[in-house]
Amino acid sequence: MNQPSTLSPRNGDIERPASDRNVTPAMERQTLTPAQLQERSIISNSLAPRPEVNAFRDLRTRLQATADGHNFVTLVTAVSPGSGASYVCRNLAAAFAFHDTRSAMVLDCNPYHPSQHTTMRIEPVRGGLTDYLRDPETDLGDIVYETGVPRLRLIPAGSPDEFGGEYFSSFRMHLLLDTLRNRYPARYLLLDGPPVSSGPDARILSDLADIVVLVAGYGRDSPAAIAQAAANFDPNKFAGVVFNQGV
């Protein structure tokens, strides 16, 4: 697996109540085995010491320390394509879900090159984020998928659409995040955004987030490119840079 560096800052399932059918996933998945987790590049909460697991636990703890005990929305975005933001986003979410009183949800917000459902081996037969945002008749519960990791859910990117990231600034997107966040106070939302260099979508998504984590490819993205990417975000939201060793 890839291993992120320590973040360098610049400055029993919780999915309840069961009666709330609007956010209850329609299909349950069996819990993944350690071998299956490794195949999907997802860390596991095992007793054996593993540097990459500790790195994500440390990152999680640092972010939680800035939030005064409240849940929050985190945007994870890369400096450039191939830097490993999706890997970092997925495993940071897994680290949040380690504790049996917390849960996490990944929203794949990269409609141009979605990857989370493929990596997690989930077939989004009921659609995903773009389907929900463009169709008011789509039910929220239809686009929430079990991942096989306890307390970790996925909303895949959805069907390709010519408007792509334009949906991110819509009222329906704001309402979606408010609903997901407020209904479960112990749930952490992570947005897997497009790279900063690909266009304005990462900056648009940052307006929806409480925290922004920037992923740089170790030995891949230059200091100048990292600084230019970081300048797109509100300094009060920008948590720092994760240097990802590999793709």
Image: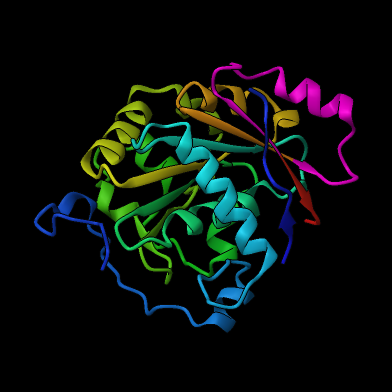
| Relative image position of residue 59 (x, y in whole percent) | 58, 46
**143 w.r.t. 171: above or below:** below
- From the viewer's perspective, tell me whether residue 175 is left or right of residue 225: left
**Nearer to us in this view, 46 or 142:** 46
Kindly give the residue lying farthest to the left in the view shown: 19
- From the viewer's perspective, tell me whether residue 21 is left or right of residue 210: left
Inspect the magenta stretch and tell me whether residue 218 lies in it: yes
| Relative image position of residue 149 (x, y in whole percent) | 43, 69
Q: Quadrant of residue 246?
A: bottom right
Name which residue lies at 88% across and 24% down. Answer: 224
**Nearer to us in this view, 209 or 158:** 209
| Relative image position of residue 140 (x, y in whole percent) | 27, 47
**Nearer to us in this view, 145 or 186:** 186
- From the viewer's perspective, tell me whether residue 116 is left or right of residue 16: right
Q: Where does the N terminus fall, quadrant-wise?
A: bottom right
Q: Quadrant of residue 78?
A: top right
**140 w.r.t. 48: above or below:** above
Q: What stretch of residues is rendered in magenta?
A: 216-241
| Relative image position of residue 207 (x, y in whole percent) | 49, 21
Name which residue lies at 45% across and 22% down. Answer: 169
**13 w.r.t. 144: above or below:** below
